Image (cartoon, helix red, strand yellow):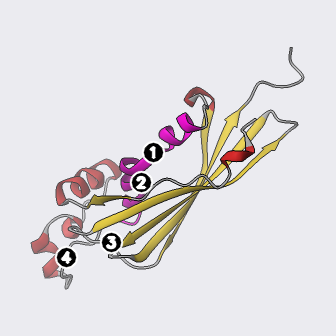
Amino acid sequence: MIDQRFKGYTTAPSTVQVDAWRVKLFCQAIGETNAVHWDANAAHAQGYTHCPVPPTFLKALESEHFSSAALLRVLTVSVGKVLHAEQSFDYIRPVHVGDVVEISRSITDLYDKREGSMSFIVVRTDYRVEQQAVGSSIQTIMIRNQDPAVP
């Protein structure tokens, strides 16, 4: 079980600049072939002033700020017992190549199920550009604990 005093733990904000090459690598990894995301000429041809990033690219930025593995180290949780249970995103406005994204993460809830055999960590990530919110995500991480019924 995870110590409840970590509920509310918040990382210091940090910033990550969105680079076209990083977006292009991300697009290759997910199978996105639309060059509008990394090629300024393609973006301009489609009416964009700057290349918009794919929505789930925010997850890649999150890992450069303070990854889930880093959060688990703070909580002294072994990565080998962890399952990424779910994640949802709320998009407020597009993020573009060239933007500097400020990221912070907070542990908003900690709870156990099945008599403590599973613990859950709920993490909120906030993304801002020029001090304006551009999106957020809620991630639930599950930890498999020692089954209390097994000696």
The residue labelled by disc 4 is 50
* Distance (Cα) linking label 1 and label 4: 27 Å
Observer-side mark, 1 or 4, equals 1
Q: CA distance from mark 2 to mark 4?
A: 21 Å
Q: Which residues are magenta?
A: 54-74
Q: Amino acid at mark 2?
A: Glu
Q: Earlier in the sequence, mark 2 or mark 1?
A: 2
Q: Amino acid at mark 3?
A: Val
Examine the structure image and report whether residue 56 is included in the region drawn in magenta: yes
Q: Provide the residue designation for mark 2.
A: 62
Residue 67 is labelled as 1
Tell me the amino acid under the disc marked 1: Ser
Question: From the viewer's perspective, is residue 132 above or below residue 141?
Answer: below
Q: Mark 2 Cα within 10 Å, few/some/many (few <14, many 20+)?
A: many
The residue pinned by badge 3 equals: 95
Disc 2 to disc 1, C-alpha distance = 6 Å
Report the residue at 9% width, 73% height from top. Answer: 41
Q: Amino acid at mark 4?
A: His
Q: Nearer the viewer, residue 121 or 22?
A: 121
Q: Are marks 3 and 2 in contact (CB under 8 Å)?
A: no
SS assignment at label 1: loop
Q: Residues within 10 Å of mark 3 (few under 14, many from 20)?
A: many
Earlier sequence position, callout 3 versus callout 1: 1
First in residue order: circle 3 vs circle 2? 2
Q: Which residue of the protein is positioned furthest toward the bottom in this rendering?
A: 47
